[in-house]
Amino acid sequence: MEQKSIEILEERIGYRFGDRNLLQCALTHTSYANEQKIRRTQDYERLEFLGDAILEMVTSAVLYRTYPDRREGELTKLRSTLVCEPALAYCARDIGLEEYLRLGRGEEACGGRQKDSIISDVMEAVIGAMYLDSGGIEEPQRFILAHILSDLENKQLFYDAKSILQEYIQRKGGEVSYEVLEESGPGHCRHFRVAVVVNGKSAAVGEGRSKKAAEQQAAYQELLHRNISRS
């Protein structure tokens, strides 16, 4: 990876690494490590393990302070929503993290750069790398607050959009379903356009790299149109 590219990524995440090998490691998939015959410890898996623990701790502390009246079960569910695989992948794409992944030729060919599972793992690995490089929790915490836990209420509404809309419509005696309007792109990089159907009538439309993501976007747009909040 070119030096300029690393610097651009550092600008996006708001942190300059002292040891850029840590960042390179966080961006390296096992398939690339195997293909290049480098040590397995040089892929992102160990950093992901560390970053996952840091993310859970920081998120727990933020939710504990933000929602003093919520019970443990509610906080656990909310934490799971905010740091689940699709949520992390969504946040990672906001900073274009998928552009910097180092993948083996086989993984690249089968669309690994667009897989939520890989992108979310790399997001956690970057957090782990930042912790080791900075020598403490301050920088990774700043990154998490800026890129994952910002605008909590709106993100919670977005990630829970399908269930919130379903509950709202059912309370009024209605039904919700989804209809694929368009499917395009090669097999490893599909693009979906989906409409949410309320009581048999097409309503808001969403787009995404999977049907699930497009449905979520459509549900979110319908919530905004109806001015429905989580509460």
Image (cartoon, rainbow, N blue to C red):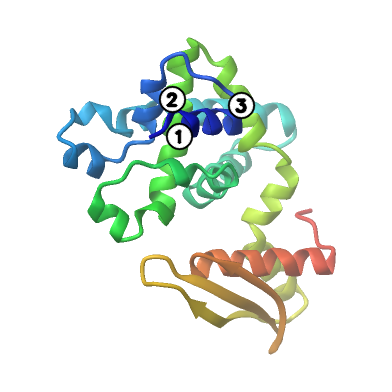
Locate residue 63, reporting x and y percent: 66, 32
**Residue in front for this viewpoint, 137 or 21:** 21
Q: Are marks 3 and 1 in contact (CB under 8 Å)?
A: no
* Amino acid marked by disc 2: Gly
**Residue in front for this viewpoint, 48 or 105:** 105
Give the Cα separation between the discs numbered 3 and 1.
16 Å
Quadrant holding the N terminus: top left
**Residue in front for this viewpoint, 69 or 50:** 50
76 sits left or right of 104 in the view: right
Q: Mark 1 points at which residue?
A: 124
Q: Which residue lies furthest to the top in this view?
A: 135
Give the Cα separation between the discs numbered 1 and 2.
6 Å
Asked if residue 197 can be seen in this view, the reply is: yes
Q: Nearer the viewer, mark 3 or mark 1?
A: 3
Residue 128 numbered mark, or none: 2
Q: Do the residues labelled 2 and 3 touch (CB within 8 Å)?
A: no
Q: How crowded is mark 3: few (under 14 residues within 10 Å), some or many (20 or more)?
A: few
**Residue in front for this viewpoint, 89 or 154:** 89
12 sits left or right of 109 in the view: right
The earlier-in-sequence mark between 2 and 3 is 3
* Amino acid marked by disc 1: Glu
The earlier-in-sequence mark between 3 and 1 is 3
Which residue occupies 50% across, 70% down?
A: 191
Q: Residues within 10 Å of mark 1 (few under 14, many from 20)?
A: many
Q: Quadrant of residue 10?
A: top right
Q: Quadrant of residue 198?
A: bottom right
Q: Name the residue under label 3.
A: 14
Q: For the image shown, how many numbered marks are present on the structure?
A: 3
